Amino acid sequence: MDPRRSLVAGIIWLVIALAASFAISASIWAGRVAREIVVQQHERRLALETDQLASDLGQAVSARLRALHAARGTSVAQIFKRLTESDPDLGWIAATDLLGRVVAGDGRMSVGGSVAASPWFSEGLRGTWIGVIDTRRGADDAPLLGDLSAPVTDDSGAIIGVIAAHLTWHWASSDVARLSQTLDSRGSAQTLVLSGAGAVAVGPDEWRGRPWPGVAVADAPGFERLPNGQTVLVARAAVGTDGKFAAQHWNVQLSEPKDQVYQRANALAVRILWISICLGAATASIGALGARHLTNRLKRLTQSAAAVGRNEVARIEVPSGRDEVAQLAAAFAKVLDDLRQERTELLTLSSELERRVTVRTREVERLAEEARYAAIVRERLKIARDLHDTLAHSMMAMLSEVRLLRKLQAHDPASLQEELARAEQVAHEGLIEARTAITQMRVNAVRDTGLGAALGKAFDRFLDRTALRGEFSADPGASGFGDERAEILFRMAEEALRNIERHAMATRALVRLETVEGTQLTLRIEDDGVGFDAGVPRPGHYGLVGLHEQAQLIGAHLRIDSAPNRGTTVTVTLRMTPEVL
């Protein structure tokens, strides 16, 4: 199953990876969508249940108010009696006069006691009030929808007291329990009744009479955050009643913790994830089996090619069919046959080449002998140039002195002694030059120190010998050049400097060695001497001829710019490669 060694394994792993990626991506996307849908459904159900509870509460309050208005009389006690007879579902009930004294009741409030300081009394004088009056009752009749207080009027419509009653009826307890059970099996939904100002009228003791503390969450519509950090889903619905009570905007509120709201959605998302993973695993398994079946033909072709490579069989087995594997096997078989045919032809050609190599070897040996002879000829030419540059110049100077001595002997014997000393000096200088040439033939300063350093030393000796003013410059790239071509450039520079010394009558000389664009090496030698006409041939003088020969020997371009009384410039340009420089 190593994909680095098996194409089948690579395809199987690819199928598994694609199936897993698709399954996980699809499950995450579907889980997110399903989670949002479930949460939206939960929000709508909570809103519908809140509307139903508000409607039921409104109907109950309206029915009690209608019963209260129908039970008119001349006194509070009389109205109380009629009300208890006509509506026994009020649970406990009490009546007070305008001063807040309890004038009638079912025993929960002591008759004759004063409730003038109670909020329900003062609010009940002004209109209908919903809240919690009796906090001492047991668990069986705990306030689910709160208590009610309202003004009592006589036949003329004048307020003569306040009636307080507990809002219980035969379906209230089961209705609230059913709503909580529908929203959450653990009964985590909380039911509250809020006043028009947003205060909790019916609810837990710690919240009653205080504003609802929830703060809307900006990025989660319908959710509010409580001071303790808990986030709850909130739904509110106005309580619709008859008369003025509808204008007070009492609201029924159902809330449920966010964790409970998302629990079902998260469970559904997890279930979708597992289902997708299982489907992905099944898809990957089927895909792996299919890939293995489809690649069996390719595997057999690979085994056949390997057997041919080991010389176990002579031909590649071509499977039947017209698919890519069959075409590939046929192509391999044809290539193998062509290779065998070419191998036979190569063997024949190899024999012919061996015969030709034998013939060429003899020819190369002959050419090598000729090359050795050519090298000897080149060395002779080099020696001839060196003799010209040293002994020929010295012998010419000595010949001139001898001729001068003969003339002086005939016409001015007195000056003969001085000219003999001069001839001796010329002979001594020629001897020094000959020895220097021999030393240079034995010791190669150019290869040892580089062309730049060798030229610099030679130019310094030239200035010391001639007392001319001069300037030498060489860039770093050209100074290190030191192969056999550098030796020839050095010889050419020496010849040019000797010409300046003997013929130019100059006062200043300049030597510059530099590279141009990294591909050319330029040697430039200038003087401000008398110059000459470079186009006029000089039979018997081989200095310029030797310069041209040396330039041709290394493939360099030689240019001589000169004119009478305008000095001379010798420029040698050698084409190089950046690696050589």
Image: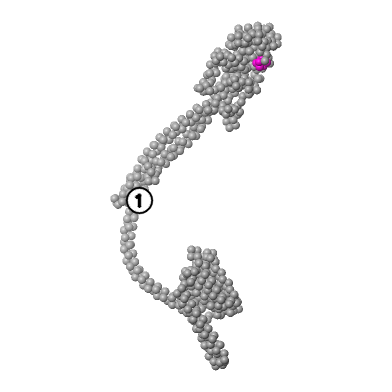
**501 to the left or right of 377:** right
Quadrant for residue 14, please give it: top left
Quadrant for residue 16, please give it: top left
- Percent across and percent down for residue 489 are 50, 72
Where disc 1 sits, the SS reads helix
Looking at this view, is 110 or 500 the one in front?
Answer: 110
Q: In the displayed orientation, state which residue is furthest to the bottom.
A: 410
Name the residue tied to disc 1.
332
- Percent across and percent down for residue 365 are 36, 71
Instruction: From this view, report whether residue 332 is shown above or below residue 530.
Output: above
| Dominant secondary structure of the residues highlighted in magenta in the image | helix
Q: Is residue 51 visible?
A: no
* Segment colored magenta: 118-124
Q: Can residue 91 be seen in this view?
A: yes
Q: Which residue is drawn at 46% across and 70% down?
A: 484
**184 to the left or right of 206:** left
State which quarter of the image contains the N terminus: top left
Residue 119 part of the magenta segment:
yes
- Percent across and percent down for residue 25 are 48, 36
Instruction: From this view, report whether residue 256 is shown above or below residue 100.
Output: below
Quadrant for residue 471, please give it: bottom right
For mark 1, does the 10 Å Cα neighbourhood hold few (<14), some (14 to 19), or many (20 or more) residues?
some
Looking at numbered disc 1 in the image, what kind of residue is underneath it? Phe
Q: Which residue is drawn at 58% across and 77% down?
A: 467
Residue 333 part of the magenta segment:
no
Instruction: From this view, report whether residue 93 is shown above or below residue 221.
Output: above
Looking at this view, is 4 or 409 the one in front?
Answer: 409
